Image: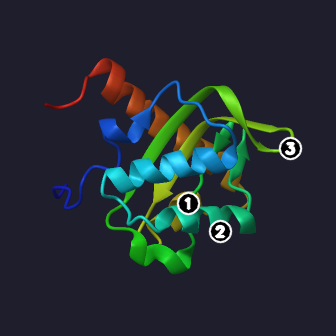
Amino acid sequence: MPPLTSPAPVSRELIRLNARAHDKTDAIAQVAQMLVAAGCVAPGYEASMGRREALANTFLGHGVAIPHGLGEDRHLVRHDGIAVLQFPGGVEWNPGQITRLVVGIAARHGHHISFWKFSKYGLVVTALSIAVAALYVWLRYFVLGWPA
């Protein structure tokens, strides 16, 4: 397997547990700022994530939301990455929809398209993808520790 040519998509600064947000807009702003601070995206990506949310709901169900930017704003993505925010108290994403895990996505050149594509079994694949990503984060953070 060839070595990775870009930074790891998940690092310690891209995970925040026990977060709090006033509402969905605040949660999206927080996850976008994490991506900006990690150098994954340019500052304008937050606005793109907001516009994307206005066009299509990124709430997947079961307490998970995956905000991401518009395809037309991929030029704002410096390198692929995800930011994870855990909200134990929940955040109302839409009326009656409470999210406890927000996974902000930054992907260049449509890399996330095959990962998140919806098909006949798209929701199962998406849920499985998130479960694998969450397991990776859990193993790296709680079991193996982070590299120095």
View extreme (right): residue: 96
Task: Indicate the secondary structure of the residue bearing disc 2.
Answer: helix
Q: Looking at the picture, which amino acid does disc 3 mark?
A: Pro
Q: Position of residue 50 (x, y in %)?
A: 63, 62
Task: Please report whichever mark, 2 or 3, sits nearer to the chain's N-terminal start.
Answer: 2
**What residue do we see at 47% from left, 72% from top?**
110
The answer to which of 105 and 17 lies nearer the viewer is 17
Answer with the quarter of the image where residue 139 lies.
top left
Q: Mark 1 belongs to which amino acid?
A: His
Measuring from the top left, give residue 23's x and y in whole percent. Answer: 70, 42
What residue is pinned by disc 3?
A: 95
Q: Nearer the viewer, mark 3 or mark 1?
A: 3
Above or below — where is 134 with respect to 7? above
User: Can you identify the residue that label 2 sits on?
Assistant: 51
Q: Residues within 10 Å of mark 1 (few under 14, many from 20)?
A: many
- For the residues labelled 1 and 2, the Cα–Cα distance comes to 9 Å
Q: Label for residue 25?
A: none
Residue at 57%, 72% in the rendered image: 70
Tell me if residue 126 comes above or below residue 98 in the rendering: below
Please give left or right for residue 72 compared with residue 59 in the image: left
Q: Give the Cα separation between the discs numbered 2 and 3.
A: 19 Å
Q: What secondary structure is found at the residue carrying circle 3?
A: loop
Residue at 73% in and 69% down? 55
Element type at mark 1: loop
Colour theme: rainbow
Quadrant housing the C terminus: top left
Left or right of 29 on screen, residue 8? left
Query: Looking at the image, which residue is at 52% across and 24% down?
Result: 18
Q: Which residue is mark 1?
A: 68
Answer yes or no: is residue 100 visible. Answer: yes
